[in-house]
Image (spheres, helix red, strand yellow):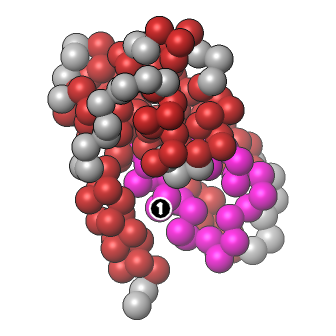
Amino acid sequence: MTKSLYSSLFFLSFVVALFEILPYVKGNILDDICPGSFFPPLCFQMLRNDPSVSKGDIHGLLSTVLHIAQDNTTSTYKLIKSILKQPIKDPNVKAQMTNCLRNYNDAVDYLNRSNDFYKSADYKNTGLYSSLAVHESLSCNHGFNEVPSQLKPLSKAVQEFSNLSARIADNLK
């Protein structure tokens, strides 16, 4: 199977999992959300002190998660842009980094749209556009045999918080 087919299969399984119903909040929001996330320790670590968690405010948490996703996506885009300004000897790596720049440009746009939909209480499209941002980050990573170490932490955060915003928004539909 080709990388493209693997990517498509992974994305399809992700979308199916995305539409599972997030449990209705019964106690600590994070106990309902983080265990099903891509990287549960990162989820707990980044969101544990958010004021919306102690209030049980799922809308406030969605706002926080969207902003974290947007910040990490923008940072990743800027990092890739700065890497591309440096000499890259391997033409395959340079081509893939160029693809990643396009992926993250699209991901920034998708998360901006997702945030706009959130502000208008259109949670279906909030979730959809957050999912598209996850797909763009995954597409960037799948182009590498080994994701460059500079990109790993940021892409992990982009995927985590874009995915979480999609899952939370799906629960609010």
**Is residue 159 at least partly visible in the picture?**
no
Residue 169 lies in quadrant: top left
Q: Is residue 144 left or right of residue 116?
A: right
Residue 82: within the magenta? no
Query: In the displayed structure, would residue 147 be above or below residue 86?
Result: below
What residue does disc 1 label? 139
Query: In the displayed structure, would residue 139 be above or below residue 42?
Result: below
The quarter of the image holding the C terminus is top left
Residue at 59%, 16% (x, y): give it. 50
Residue at 74%, 61% (x, y): give it. 148
Q: Is residue 51 left or right of residue 135?
A: right
Q: Is residue 126 left or right of residue 69?
A: left
The quarter of the image holding the N terminus is bottom left
Residue at 43%, 35% (x, y): give it. 32
Q: Position of residue 45 (x, y in %)?
A: 68, 32
Of the pair 156 and 58, the residue shown nearer to us: 58
Q: Is residue 89 left or right of residue 27?
A: right
Which residue range is magenta in the image?
Answer: 133-157
Residue 90 lies in quadrant: bottom right
Q: Position of residue 113 (x, y in %)?
A: 32, 28
Amino acid type, callout 1: Ser
Magenta region, main secondary structure: helix
Within 10 Å of the Cα at label 1, are there few (<14), some (14-19), or many (20+) other Cα atoms?
A: many
Residue at 62%, 34% (x, y): give it. 44
Of the pair 106 and 37, the residue shown nearer to us: 37
Query: How many discs mark residues in the rendered view?
Result: 1
**Is residue 44 at least partly visible in the picture?**
yes
Q: Position of residue 139 (x, y in %)?
A: 47, 61
Of the pair 8 and 96, the residue shown nearer to us: 8
